[in-house]
Image (spheres, helix red, strand yellow):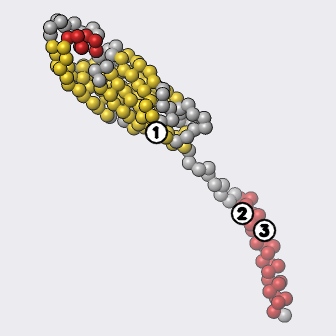
Amino acid sequence: MIKRSITFFAVAAIIAALLPGIAMAEEEDWIITATLEAVPEMAVSVLPGDAAHSVTGIFLLYGAPREGMPMTFEIISGPNAGLSDTIPCDDTGQATFSYTYTQDPPVPGEDVIRVSTPPGLYVDIIKRWELAGPPVVPNISGWGLLAAAIMFGLLIPIAARSYLHARA
């Protein structure tokens, strides 16, 4: 799990802008401690079958979840670059972003997903997209073995007869 924390000194006006709903006196200053985590830190999917992915961000303010805090998920590079959404945290401080691989035909690559919250925290995580391996080479079937046995069965007597004629 990737985790980033930030502690900063802020005046009342900044706190009111960043963290709506916190009541405080106009002249009061606070030291803010916030934490942002994102899971999974790294994930791998094999295309074309496994095309869905979800990322969950967890925001804590002073160690407690902050319901309603907007969390932005943005794919900043990779095959799905440009996809984004802003989702409010639930009562556990979590927000989940889900998306589906969109390129057709699929190409391998890594999406870098940036998860961010208003106090200036962000975490980048990786989603790797891989292509299915090479096609399976068919092995010799029972019919193939039978055909090979027949060919060798026919060739051995012919070769033996040629050998005997050459010696005579």
- Using the numbered discs, state the Cα–Cα distance from disc 2 to disc 3 in whole angstroms: 9 Å
The residue that mark 2 highlights is: 145
- In what element is the residue under mark 2? helix
Q: Is 84 in front, or is 58?
A: 84
Query: Tags 1 and 2 in contact by the CB under 8 Å rule?
Result: no
Which residue lies most toward the bottom here?
A: 168
Q: Check residue 150 in the rendering and tell me which mark sits there, or answer none.
A: 3
Q: Which mark is residue 51?
A: none
Percent x, y of residue 15? 23, 13
Q: Is residue 162 above or below residue 79?
A: below
Could you classify mark 1 by the number of other residues whose Cα lies within 10 Å: few (under 14), some (14-19), or many (20 or more)? some
First of labels 1, 3 by sequence position = 1
Amino acid type, residue under disc 2 in the picture: Leu
Q: For the residue marked with disc 1, what is the amino acid?
A: Glu
Q: Nearer the viewer, residue 163 or 62?
A: 62
Residue at point 43%, 31% (across, down): 76
Say few, some or many: other residues with alpha carbon within 10 Å of mark 2 (under 14 / 14 to 19 / 20 or more): few
Q: Is residue 108 left or right of residue 159?
A: left
Q: Which residue is mark 1?
A: 110
Tell me where residue 17 appears, x and y as whole percent.
28, 12
Image point (19%, 14%), residue name: 11
Instruction: Give the left or right position of residue 77, taking residue 69 as reference.
Output: right
